[in-house]
Amino acid sequence: MNLKKVLPLKHIVLSLLSSALLLSVVGLLMQVKTDMFKNVGTIYLNLNMQTAAANAVTSVVTFFRGIDTVGEVTVLFLATSGVALMLSATQRTCDKVVKQESFILNAGSRLLLSVIILFGVYIIIHGHLSPGGGFQGGVVIATAFLLLFLANPNMKLSHGILTLGESLSGATYVLVVIIGLFKMNILLGNFLPHPIGEIGELISGGIIPVVYILVGIKVGSEMSVIVEYFVKEDYYKEVCDA
Amino acid sequence: MIFQIILLIMLAYVVGFIYFGLYRNITARIQGRYGPTVYQSFYDSIKLFSKNNTVSYGWMFYLGPVIMATGAVLTLVLVPVFSDSDFLRSVTSQGNLFVLLYLMVLGPLGNALAVGTGGNPFGVMGVVRGLTRLIGLELPFYIAVVGLIIAANSSDIVHIIDVQKTAGLNIINHPLLFIGAMISMVGFFGASPFDIPGAPQEVYSGPRTEFSGKFLALLMSQGSLFAFAKLVLIVDLFLGGADSLVMLVLKTFTIFVAIIFIGIVYGRYKVEQAVDFLMKLPTLIAVLGLARIVWFG
Amino acid sequence: MSLGYYFLLPVLFSFLTPYFKKLGSFTLRGSSILLSLVLFLQTVAYVGVKLPQISQFSIKPPLGIAFILDGYSLLFLLIFTFSALVVSFYMYWFFEENSGRDEARFYVFFNMLIAGSIGMILSCDIFNLYIFFEITGICSYTLSAFNKDKLGLESGIKYLIIGSIASIFIVFAIMLIYLQIGTVNLGLIAQRFHLIDPKISVLIVLMLFIGFGAKAELFPMNFWAPDIYQGSISSVNGLFSSVVAKAYLFVFFHLFYLFNLGSKYMLFVMVIGAITFLVSEFTALNQTNVKRLFAYSTLGQLGILFMALSTNSSQTVSGALFHLTSHSISKLLIFLALGILIHKFKSAKIDILGNFKSGFLTIVLAIGFLSILGIPPFSGFVGKILILKGFALSQNYTAIAFILLVSIVEAIYFFRLTAMMLDKKRAKVTVKVGSVNYIILTLLAVLIILFGVYPSLLTHYTDLATNALLHPTNYLNYALGVGL
Amino acid sequence: MLDFFNNTQTIHMIIIIGSMALFFIGFYGIATQKNLVKVLVSFDIMESALFLFFIGLHYQVGLVAPIVDKNLKTFTSMVDPVPQAMILTTIVIGLAVLALGLSFGIEYYKLTGRNDISKMNELRD
Amino acid sequence: MNSIFLLLNLLPILFLYQFGGALHVSLPLTSEFTLSLIQTPLGTFFAYLSLISFLLVTIAQKSKKLACNYYVLQFLLSMAMLAIVLAGDFITFFIGWEIMTWSSYFLISKSNSIDIKSLQKYILFSLASAFSLIAGIVIAYSFAHSFDFSVISNSFKDMPFNIKVALIVLFSLSFFTKAGVIGLHYWVVDTYSKAPNLFSSILSAVMSKMGIYGLFLVYGNIVGYQELKMMFGTILNGTDFGYVLAWIGVATSIIATFKAITQDEVKRLLAYSSIAQLGYIIAVIGFGTTYGVAGAMYHTLIHTIIKLLLFINVAAIVAQTGKNRFSQLGGLIYRTPVSFVMLLIGIIGLAGMPPLGGFASKFMMYNAAIDTKFALILIGMLFSGAASFLYCYKLVYGIYLGHPTSKNLETTKEVPISYLIPQIILALLLVLAGTFPGAFIKIINPILVEFSLSTIPYSGLGVMNSAVGSFNGFFIMSAFVVFFVLILLLITRIKSKAKNNLNRFDISYCGEVPTQDTSLHFGFGFGTDLYRIKFVNAILKRSSSSFYESLATQTKKTSELFSRMYYGNIHNTMIIILLFFSTLFFIGVN
């Protein structure tokens, strides 16, 4: 009898340690007083009338902490590049075509595609008005392509268009940031007229919806690329192994 | 001065050879032989000077004995012979005890070079033995000399002699040093148990193997000069020097006889035994004497 | 001229890279060099300008995020942009020799690595800093896996795992900070940090320590570091050693002094630094792979820097910053020169690399080695003596003895390498150095000597940096938006 | 009974306990699991726990989402939008790292057929 | 190339001469460091010593085809040494010291016989020396707040006692390593013997003297002999400190002498001899008396001359024959007679025999020991001196005397003139130093004033005065020459038929007739029988190498132990990080 298997000492010790840590951290956090200082968020809420975006989270994401979002988009872009770097080379070498799985599945998914994309676009465009925004919408768009891939393994995305969308939206986003410097003497300044209409209307909030649309395009194309690579990875593995 | 030097050399030459003859004679008598006459060595040297030289190995072989003789002569003139006279005082004052200590080695070095040039294995063997012996042999003597220098606070021999006039003879004041120095002296005179370099029974003549004719004569002559100089030095250091020729001969002869008697009694050490021995008892004795001077003087 | 360009221009470049790629590899390489050159020139233009400089995003701090350039970050900015410039020239040669690599993506990650590192040192908002931390991280993971062979991927995975742990701790810390202080602006955090519950503050500091310490390769958390160096290409090693590690170190001490932690923490960091130094230098002795060897050497030097920077004495800190600069240059030189050799021999084993024959490479490598060892008249000496002098002034003889003793261990392997280079008995293979590399390496070597014989060139900036680090009043004012 | 749960203190307590429990499950996971995918999942669990923790602690009874609409014309008595914005960013970053990690893992698995992180030891002297 | 660097080497000499003791430059390096050069009598002495040595060695290098970088490094080395001896503050000193270290390292590495182990030994000991030096420097700085010699010297009295001791120990360790005190000499022999042959002369003659200069600087200038006396108290007529140092020096001298005797490689013998001779200097350097300083100084000069002479001589022979062992050489006397005479003069000087300079310096040192009543020290020195005759003879015999051991030795030609010129100059210097020892008193007196010691009375060029006796070098030399000539004349007057050009096989050889194949070069390996003497055996069988080897092994083991941690298991690394976090958490929070 293997004693090590019966008594996985490492696991026991680590679980005990985790529990001990859990208890003490919880004990510590219970004492936390959260209202010592006024949160910066409340100030943002007060300022939010000026930005004229109905969704305060959106104005924080795209405007008050807008550079975070630039970074975030960059992170996603880098991850996509990384995934592409890792997975693209092997996929090119294995270029077989497999049999169509099912016509109904294919047709149904195509039917659903437009609906899902439309929904994604709606989420993106209404990012400054309702919950949602560029990221969320982008991911929704990517799920449409996921569906497509699941239905039709031979499906291929046009990388040219995706890259174009991705690059242009990204570059425009950066340009928007820089234009702020020239127009408002502050980077990412809200140089577009705002509030143009009532808060809660579609065209309001200056650059905020513009930024979110750009983000949406970028995230949508990037996530689609990621999805394609991962889905196809699995698929090609099976094909190549066979 | 030149006259005095010549006189001194002649004196040393004669006395040295006579002592050497006496040495052979006394040894023989103790060993129950008759031995040669006292003047035999003297005659030998004269004879050798006039004999043909059969062998030469180039100029270094030629110069070696000359260097050795030069060292001996230089040593001789730098040792004050008479304590209260101005005899060669202007010469001896140019050197000191340390000069003498090192001059005593210069001569053998010259010889060793000549021997090396000759390339005879036995000669080299003798040289090597002699040099190895030196490690131990000089030690008690050095200690004694250092002790005396520190006691007198001077390395000037004349000063050491002068000190003995007031403070008493060093042999009485520092007997341990004297014993140490005497043991070394036995070796310096090539007497048993330290007669390792020559070692007549084993290597048939040690360093002198290849020498003959005038070179051998020169080596013999310088040997007697050197022996005389060493005796005078011991007399100067321990017996307060000699103020007249008679005293000089008396004192040197006493020392000489003492050395002979020590030498005859013992058999020869091997070289490492000799060094080992010399580093133990004589050194210890001398160091004790020295410690007395340094810490309690 | 705005600080934001340090981040925005590389981002713009990266987004547009697919189109540069289509215009041909020359354009791609050229544009990357141009980008590095522009950023470097911009940094040079900041030299002599009244500091600190600020560049705001969207809204005035403390509400908004801003990039603030003070003396401390200027020094690092100079190092980073200079390293980037040098490496981008070097990569021109590299891709000439190794065609068929995914050049465009490399330049994306390379430029974003620099941009992320610069972002970390410029940002005055800790959450923003975290994002740059992640950008740098992702670029480092991918760059270490860039070879896409077993070793590369292994190092990428390892780096990614460590990076994830670090980022989780940092996120946790940031969340606790926001919960307690209500903001993530560094100025306000610094102002209010001592007011919060000491137990929570310990937890926050601890988590930041683990997060940044693990990335800055401190002792019990640096077992992964040599693997990363071994798995990646040597110009990337140079960047890791002279840019990335330094950026994490920057943040570590920036926060350390902004939060104004007590002497207990200082002693702790000093001890940890000392252990890092000791263990790394001893471990380096046993290496046969040259990349691992210099990875350990980097760890060791970081150990010294941690020891010296945690003293809160301006003398020592100034010396440490000098040493840091000189170490960055030297390590860049060494890794780039080794890159040429590794390319030639297709191996990183010391025994094989020792067979090269090139007077030029021998000289520049020797200069690099001597500089790192702190031997005059090279720049490392000035750094080391300044550090020792600082310790001497605070009468910390233990640290002096420790540094000197371990330095001897360091000397063992450095001079083993030197002796191997000089060994005439080896079967020698002549290595030719291309003109671009010739210029780059000569430039680096000249800089090492220049800073060694005329340290005033650099001490001015290290003194500025020290002042800014230890007395961050101006920085805090800007971060709080006072007087903007 | 419902009143008891409709209390900010109580909600915070539950969230702390729950999220931290989740966090340390992830902690235990990364400490014990050797499969790369499981490790990455553990990281995600830890991150999720943090999101929960952060968002949860900024909820207070009576506050609503920070969005104005026809009924609510001013930005008052709303929850803090900053944590939500931060979490949004962190989620995306987590996603990016996860994707990258998985792609590394896939590629590594293709080359070696292994996904046990404790057996990744080709990088050694 | 050679001529250019010859001129370059000449320049600083002229430069120094031009300034004539008034050189004072300071160059701000940073706001904190200033490089300053000050010409003191002590520094000037060492500066000329090193510069002239370099000049002579460069002359000797004429016949070797050396690359430009060799000369550049050598020139750099000479400049570094100049910086050391003219330094007015510790930073300049240290920079010079380190440049000296690495430039010599690269020069040594240019040798064909060097191996990595020896190079490692050299550089690690040098760096240990440098690091010990820098430790001392910064500790001094922590009290004086300046690197300037004079400031540190002034504030030295106010330092706590343990700091004073620490400073003295650190500085001494550093300089002892350079000078090769026993125990710290592990690198010396390998380095000297494996370095390029001509460069060995620089190593032994000049570089080791930088250690001596450092000791003078620290004991004489920085600490001050008066302060040393006050710090440690007195024993007999000298200081406790001097006594301890003297024993270190004497032990070095004796042990190295015996080690030298047993060597077979020529340069190893010279290396050990160098250690032994520096042992004398170290023995008297701490006395703090006029004659101690003078003796050390004089022996520094003489040893430089002798070792340059001997190493150049040996280098020439090695270059000419390609052999570097006594067992492979021999019988060269009539092939290379000039070299032989030069070596002969060298070893007479080395053995310290009267007509030459070697005696004068030894006399000075012995007198210093008598002055302080350190009798056992003196005996130790005398003993080691006596033993040194063995290796002196071995040196001359093994190379030039006896029989040639191989065919090509019988056809060897005289060494090139460029080797001989420096040797002749040095031999002349040695003869002059022995003939006019009084001239040295003139050189030494300003240095004694610098150390605030009483000066030595000067009474003529030929006379060497001391507290306990004097001798007239001029007289002894002339007497020697006169007697030599007279006896030579006498012996040549005696006509005898001497067969010159005798075949070397015509020797008495136990009745055998030796032939070409008979091995006749006996005695080159003497000294090996010294193992049979208990005392000497005790010295010879011990070696510092076992200590350092075990140190190296321990280091390697530690390294392996630490390497195991970097095994590369990321899973364990994660666990360690988490455990580290937990530990710190529990410690920090509770």
Image: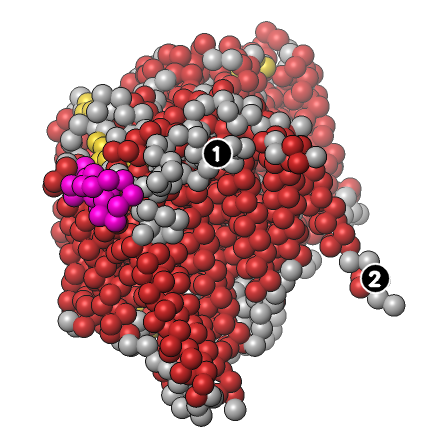
Residue D1 showing in the rendered view: yes
Residue with the mark numbered 2:
A6
| Image position, residue B58 (x, y; %) | 38, 61
| Image position, residue D49 (x, y; %) | 57, 47
Give, as a three-letter code, the residue at label 2.
Val
| Alpha carbons under labels 2 and 1: distance apart | 52 Å
- C206 vs A130, left or right, is right
Where E334 sits versus E122, above or below? below
Residue under the point 23% across and 29% down: C52
**Which label sits in the foreground, 2 or 1?**
1
Residue under the point 56% across and 25% down: A33
From the viewer's side, name the closer residue of C392 and B292: C392
Magenta span dominant secondary structure: loop
From the viewer's side, name the closer residue of E451 and C405: C405
Question: If the image is split into quadrants, where does the C terminus of chain E sit?
Answer: top right
**The residue tagged with tag 1: helix, strand or loop?**
loop
Residue with the mark numbered 1:
D63
Image color mode: secondary structure
Residue B54 showing in the rendered view: no
Where B256 sits versus A154, above or below? above
Where C450 sits versus E411, above or below? above
Label 1 resides on the chain identified as D
Residue under the point 65% across and 32% down: D3
| Image position, residue B293 (x, y; %) | 64, 16
